Image: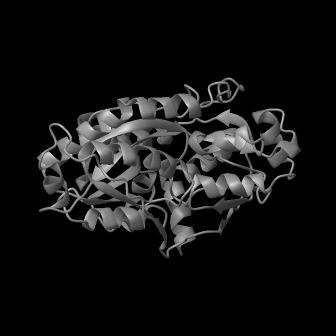
Amino acid sequence: MDVVYWHTMAGNNRRSRRTVLKYGGAAGMVGLAGCADVLGGGGSDDVRVIVPYSEGGGTDIYARQLAPVMAEELDVSVEIDNVVGSGTIQGMNELYQADTDGSTVGVINGPSILYIMRPDLLEFDYLDFESAGAFARTVFVISAHPDDDIDDYQDLVDRYQDGEFTEFGGLTIGEGQWLVANLMRDIHGLEFESYVAYSSSGELAQANASEEIPSGNPTETTLEEFIGDELLEPVVATASDGSPTLPDVPTFEDEGFDPLPYGDFSRGLLFPPDTDEDILEEWEAALETAVESEEIQDWSDDSGNMVEFNDREWWQEEWTEGPERIEAAIEEEASVEDYRDEVEEDED
């Protein structure tokens, strides 16, 4: 089946909507004397937090919860910058080229599927980024509009096969949600005709809620609020061990389908290459403190969004070795090279 791809948001052009959050760190905090000098490069206490997705997506939600707590711990002010363009490439490229003084940090999902699908599109060496720990594992959840009365995943597949539904929504072509959609098509027979690409899970879920598309695969972090407002319904979680945020949502195996070789990812902090070790340790400690704080734990309990600290070593290994592991798993079920060809055809 030929697949037509639509781009409804940013394609190859940067669309950056910046929101400044001036969270002033508490002055005179114990054990942090001189910390701002280390992070800000000689006295600056302003830190730019790059989120390579538009506002309202899961990464953005986490960043806006964690940033003020880390800022207070580090005695700095933070500016959250949503840098969107060519998927995550624009934001990651800006992070790669940023100063190495700790004044720029990226809140990014990984491992990057784009590195598997089209590494030639990247203007940086993916493996050179420095890490400072991770804070969550996130699952994609297939969503549907309540008015469509989807019984279960089999019912959704049947409606695509019957031609009642034709469009399926996700994020930028070549990245994780696009890969999940193609795996569902090739392994489960979810025969969509058009893939509609959005710049964040927030925009994707809103499009599904407004019936612009019949179904999509937003992150559980984003979908949870739409479910609470009865705007969308969850159909199935894409990871074999289910959704931490929506534990009652069935998995593919629960629904009688084969598991996918990819269905979840981690979220963590990345820094430009050659960032000083002391700076990375400062950020790692601040992240751990933030994750374990009462404020963040209360938010996690109230929202259902999982927070779990993993150290720099774990996140660095996940970031650098994850793509090879995921590619090998995909090859057992489908062809990575065929997927690369699809991405390349779309770029042309």
Identified at 44% across, 56% down, the residue is 114
Q: Position of residue 161 (x, y in %)?
A: 82, 47
| Side of 302 where 232 appears, left or right | right
| Side of 189 where 316 appears, left or right | left
Quadrant position of residue 98: bottom left
Placement of 342 over or under 304, stated as above or below = below
- The quadrant the C terminus occupies is bottom right
Placement of 93 over or under 29, stated as above or below = below
Q: Position of residue 4 (x, y in %)?
A: 69, 65
Identified at 67% across, 59% down, the residue is 195
Q: Nearer the viewer, residue 48 or 25?
A: 25
Q: Position of residue 179 (x, y in %)?
A: 55, 50
Identified at 43% across, 49% down, the residue is 63
- The quadrant the N terminus occupies is bottom right
**Total numbered labels placed on residues in the image:** 0
| Side of 277 where 332 appears, left or right | right
Say whether residue 110 is visible. Answer: no
Q: Nearer the viewer, residue 82 or 259?
A: 82
What kind of colouring is applied to the model shown?
Answer: one colour
Placement of 242 over or under 235, stated as above or below = above
Say whether residue 127 is visible. Answer: yes
Quadrant position of residue 119: bottom left
Identified at 69% across, 39% down, the residue is 188
Q: Position of residue 25 (x, y in %)?
A: 29, 49
